[in-house]
Amino acid sequence: MGYTLPRLVRIGFSIVLFAALSSAACAQNNTSIFIEQVQAITPDNLCVATPDPSAVFWSSGLMDVAYASEYDGELLVGNQLVSRGDQATMRPESARVQLYSADLTIFDASGATLSSFSVPISGFVDVGSGNTPGYGVVHVPLIDAATAAAIPPGQTVVSRVKIYGVTLGDIQVETGNWDYPIYVCAGCIKCVCPATADADYAKSCNPGQNEAVDCRLATCWNAATGTGCGCKPAA
């Protein structure tokens, strides 16, 4: 004959089991959503970041304080949550994620903390299919203006990011910490000389970030003479 737990013991066991399951459901999970890379926006792609992991991306950043006061990133965020939608039963999809906040900590070359802050963000990550994650892009300031002004040029800093979101089913999710190195300089980004004095400005998506800028935006350019920055006199 089997043994049956007394009623009070059964109740106590049920409470403990419920608490354990509840705790597991609320446990921190850094795998549901994740940061994969910084999407490269260039004139070639019309300065538009697409939620595509195969698109061109920046593996590290370059910030020239002669042109830029902060460094902005278009972060590709993946969603590995299992789809909950079911058309057959008319159950709506609840695993899509709204991104709403990012924590940032910026370290200098020695690992010392330069600043730590949180910013509101706005982004959306769709659900994936099978083992393939869904992706979305969100704009995050990886170096804010106040921190940039305090960084001595000529060194690499690291921007550490954690992003927070909530599913359409009202479940809080967050990424793990993700590090992105950025070299900060003053006047190191190459500039493009104008073909003529009245030529259109060379397009740059984020002047002072990663790519060349028009020399007419540089402090070495002399607008009166149409020379400077190593450029020949513009016709």
Image: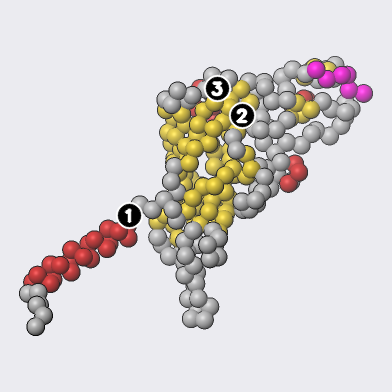
Q: Quadrant of the C terminus?
A: top right
Helix, strand or loop at disc 2? strand
Residue that label 2 marks:
63
Q: Which of the two discs, 1 and 2, labels the residue nearer the N terminus?
A: 1
Q: Quadrant of residue 3?
A: bottom left
Helix, strand or loop at disc 3? strand
Question: As displayed, is residue 193 above or below residue 40?
Answer: above
At a point 74% along the width and 17% down the height, the residue shown is 220
Magenta part of the protein: which range?
230-235
Helix, strand or loop at disc 1? loop
- Toward the front, the furthest residue is 1
- Toward the right, the furthest residue is 235
Identity, as a three-letter code, of the amino acid under mark 3: Gln
Question: As displayed, is residue 11 above or below residue 54?
Answer: below
Q: Position of residue 4 (x, y in %)?
A: 10, 77
At a point 44% along the width and 53% down the height, the residue shown is 31
Question: As displayed, is residue 14 above or below residue 221?
Answer: below
Q: Position of residue 121 (x, y in %)?
A: 51, 47
User: How many residues crowd around disc 3 within 10 Å: few (fewer than 14), some, or many (20 or more)?
Assistant: few
Number of labels in the image equals 3
User: How many residues crowd around disc 1 within 10 Å: few (fewer than 14), some, or many (20 or more)?
Assistant: few
